[in-house]
Image (cartoon, rainbow, N blue to C red):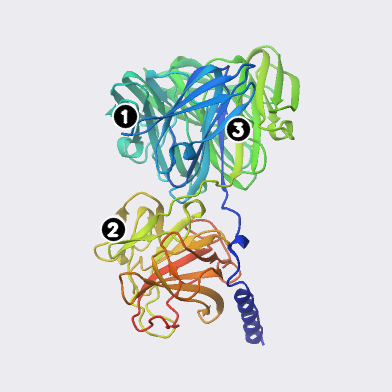
């Protein structure tokens, strides 16, 4: 009786698939959201120059420059985009009083470019640069910075790590007409120092791979010394403790100081907070004061090694469920930075980071609240003084709309404001914070960002000298997993499955002994991928690939050729499924099999172009055999399955099923 019920359920599901097999592409799901967070210090006032060293429009990156005119006169802004060896691109923007310009850098400079920005304005403006990303096809998130007001010949970074699952970069921007020679010193947590000489060509941007230069498995602070003023920024991308994926960035500091303040900080559930202290001089001592919304502050002392980096785990010091601001004082000049890693509200994972403030300000500006659908924005204000201070938070909307909150903050305390609530109903809202004395203000943001830029097709592997295009767009890609294909088709005949050469960075190979002769795990750097453990099938470890994506994601043709079959079949003779078989141009007898779709968007005999032609829609496999998180991508496991078979016996009319993946 159980078998009868199972058979009826399978047939009913098959009918459902057949009904939707050729549904309109308009029925497809919304884009895969990139979740994460970022945090910035505000601007103390308008500036006439601003610089942003990091930036890219490569696949999986969407960059925005947000410029706010906080004054009553029209602002004239010149934006200069600097690249590697290419000539700069210049854009002029006029901004009305109290209005803003949100510039898509992807649209301004085109795809596939690493770019820095130099901004000049009259009168002064405030600005920030936001980047949202799907890094290497596996880690989503975003980061932001308010940039710096001027170049410098010396830059410092306290945070930095090259531990497993972390990739650190150093971006150097030269806005001048001549080449600049730099010496980069890496100060490790062990006390060891390493140096590297880097030349940055005129009017260009240079990127340094810190993992390669400092070595793997290190905690590292950085000092940049240049022959002429330039700008330095340090982006990092991570899979933090194999749990939280994302990225953060920080523009460097041009100064060391004996005092550093941080307004934001929390040890609530799902947050881990760190304090990084860089000491480029002789050994010394730092005192950290921990301040809370309610209750007294307390202090702890830490020994600082000479020319080294010291790290404090704030959660361990304060205990859980604390909102906390920090003041660091030292007996010598140091640099302090505060990275935080999180799974916000048990949903959005990532991290953010800021370098502290060396002095409070009576006024802070933020060019945008970063609130609205899919965004949760907060304003953290710290009173580092010894007396109470009046605080006024004003949120303005363009073309009208205004709200404010006023309070008296006790000495040595912290307050948090909900910017989503304060900006509700306002257009392009922005923030001004005023105090009766010195304050420190930060704006942490958490989000699920929906990608807006159409990505370029990209190759995930090669075979027989040809590129195999990803069936999932870069913005929707959650990770590729290669594995052993079944040696036989459903008709019991050999499929003669072909080993593909993966492209990108292999994050994990659990089947190293079954890599085909002549193939490598180290080809290219476009995306990351995994190789699964053996399935005891006797085939090579890269004869099949599962490209993970959310159910409902569009699937594109991996190769150019002719559709040999677009049909329903029973996966393992038990599960209803849809597949497309594509005869590959230039390779008689070979076809690419694309499995696990809920809708088909092509028909037999149709021509398809690699990376361009939609062929179907990723199906929901969870009800069948993917009931838990995938051990590699940590997602549900829905995917498009690919493999290349040599089946000259099938021809255009063949219907024998190819081998398929296992649950």
Q: Secondary structure at mark 1?
A: loop
| Pair 3/1: label in front | 3
**Callout 3 touching callout 1 (CB < 8 Å):** no
| On-image quarter of the N terminus | bottom right
**Circle nearer the N terminus (3, 1):** 1
Residue at point 29%, 24% (across, down) = 183
Q: Which quarter of the picture shows residue 460? A: bottom left
- On screen, residue 382 versus residue 511, left or right, reads right
Mark drawn on residue 192: 1
Q: At 40% across and 66% down in the image, what residue appears?
A: 483
* Left or right of residue 313, residue 414 in this image: right
Left or right of residue 615: residue 100? right
Q: Rate crowding at label 2 as few (under 14), some (14 to 19) or many (20 or more) other CA atoms within 10 Å.
A: few
> Which mark identifies residue 149?
none
Is 174 drawn above or below residue 509 in the view shown? above
Note whether residue 375 is visible. yes
- Mark 1 crowdedness (10 Å alpha carbons): few <14, some 14-19, many ≥20: few
Name the residue located 52 percent from the left edge and 28 percent from the top edge: 354
The residue that appears at 38% across and 56% down in the rendered structure is 459
- Does the residue at mark 2 contact the one at mark 3 (Cβ under 8 Å)? no
State the SS at label 3: strand
Q: Nearer the viewer, mark 2 or mark 1?
A: 2
Query: Picture coordinates of residue 107 (x, y %)?
Result: 49, 40
> Is 207 in front, or is 83?
83
Please give the residue where the numbered disc 2 appears in the rendered image: 520
**Marks 2 and 1, Cα distance to the nearest angstrom?**
34 Å
| C-alpha separation, residue under disc 2 versus residue under disc 3 | 42 Å
Mark closer to the chain start, 2 or 1:
1
Cα gap from disc 3 to disc 1, whole angstroms: 34 Å
Q: Identify which residue, 380 or 524, lies in the foreground.
A: 524
Q: x%, y% of residue 30?
A: 60, 54
Residue holding disc 3: 444
């Amino acid at each position: 009786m159980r078998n009868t019920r199972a058979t009826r359920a399978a047939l009913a599901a098959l009918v459902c698939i057949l009904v939707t097999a050729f549904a309109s592409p308009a029925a497809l799901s919304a884009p895969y959201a990139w979740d994460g967070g970022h945090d910035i210090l505000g601007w103390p006032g308008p500036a006439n120059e601003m610089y942003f060293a990091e930036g890219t429009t490569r696949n999986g990156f969407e960059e925005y420059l947000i410029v706010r005119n906080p004054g009553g006169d029209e602002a004239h802004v010149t934006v200069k985009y600097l690249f590697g060896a290419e000539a700069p691109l210049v854009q002029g923007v006029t901004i009305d009083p109290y209005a803003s310009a949100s510039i898509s850098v992807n649209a301004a400079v085109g795809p596939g470019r690493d770019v820095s920005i130099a901004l000049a304005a009259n009168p002064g403006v405030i600005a920030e640069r936001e980047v949202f990303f799907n890094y290497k096809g596996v880690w989503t998130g975003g980061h932001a910075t308010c940039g710096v007001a001027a170049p410098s010949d010396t830059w410092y970074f306290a945070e930095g790590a090259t531990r497993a699952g972390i990739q650190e970069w150093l971006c150097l921007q030269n806005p001048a007409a001549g080449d600049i020679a730099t010496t980069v010193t890496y100060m490790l947590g062990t006390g060891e120092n390493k140096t590297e000489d880097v030349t940055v060509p005129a009017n260009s941007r240079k990127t340094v791979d810190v993992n390669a230069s400092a070595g793997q498995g290190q905690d590292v602070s950085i000092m940049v010394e240049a022959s002429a003023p330039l700008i330095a920024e340090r982006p990092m991308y991570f899979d933090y403790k194999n749990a939280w994926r994302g990225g953060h960035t920080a523009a460097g500091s041009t100064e060391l100081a004996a005092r550093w303040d941080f307004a934001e900080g929390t040890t609530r559930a799902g947050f881990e907070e760190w304090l990084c202290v860089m000491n480029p001089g002789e050994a010394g001592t730092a005192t950290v004061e921990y301040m809370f919304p309610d209750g007294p502050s307390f202090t702890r002392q830490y020994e600082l090694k000479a020319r080294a980096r010291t790290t404090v785990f704030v959660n361990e010091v304060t205990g859980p469920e604390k909102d906390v601001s920090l003041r660091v004082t030292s007996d010598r000049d140091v640099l302090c930075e505060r990275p935080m890693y999180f799974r916000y509200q048990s949903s959005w994972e990532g991290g953010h980071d800021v370098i502290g403030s060396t002095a409070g300000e009576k006024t802070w500006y933020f060019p945008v609240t970063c609130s609205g659908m899919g965004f949760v924005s907060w304003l953290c204000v710290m009173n580092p003084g010894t007396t109470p201070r009046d605080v006024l938070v004003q949120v303005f909307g363009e073309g009208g709309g205004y709200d404010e909150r006023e309070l008296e903050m006790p000495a040595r305390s912290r307050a948090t404001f909900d910017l989503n609530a304060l900006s509700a109903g306002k257009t392009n809202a922005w923030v001004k914070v005023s105090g009766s004395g010195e304050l420190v203000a930060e704006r942490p943001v958490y989000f699920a960002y929906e990608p807006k830029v159409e990505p370029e097709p990209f190759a995930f592997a090669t075979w027989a000298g040809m590129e195999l295009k990803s069936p999932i767009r870069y913005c929707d890609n959650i990770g590729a997993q290669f594995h052993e294909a079944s040696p036989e088709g459903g008709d019991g005949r050999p499929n003669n499955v072909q080993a593909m050469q993966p492209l990108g960075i292999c994050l994990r190979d659990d089947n190293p002994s079954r890599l085909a002769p002549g193939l490598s795990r180290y080809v290219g750097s476009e995306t990351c991928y995994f190789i699964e453990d053996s399935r005891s099938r006797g085939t090579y470890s890269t004869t099949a690939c599962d490209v993970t994506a959310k159910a409902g994601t569009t699937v594109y043709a991996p190769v150019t050729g002719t559709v040999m079959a677009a049909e329903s079949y029973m996966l393992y003779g038990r599960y209803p499924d849809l597949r497309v078989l594509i005869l590959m141009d230039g390779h008689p007898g070979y076809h690419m099999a694309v499995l696990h779709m809920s809708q088909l968007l092509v028909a037999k005999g149709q021509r398809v172009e690699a990376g361009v032609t939609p062929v179907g829609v990723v199906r929901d496999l969870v009800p069948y055999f993917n009931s838990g998180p995938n051990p590699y991508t940590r997602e549900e496991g829905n995917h498009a399955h690919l493999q290349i078979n040599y089946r000259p016996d099938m021809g255009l009319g063949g219907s024998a099923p190819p081998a398929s993946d296992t649950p």
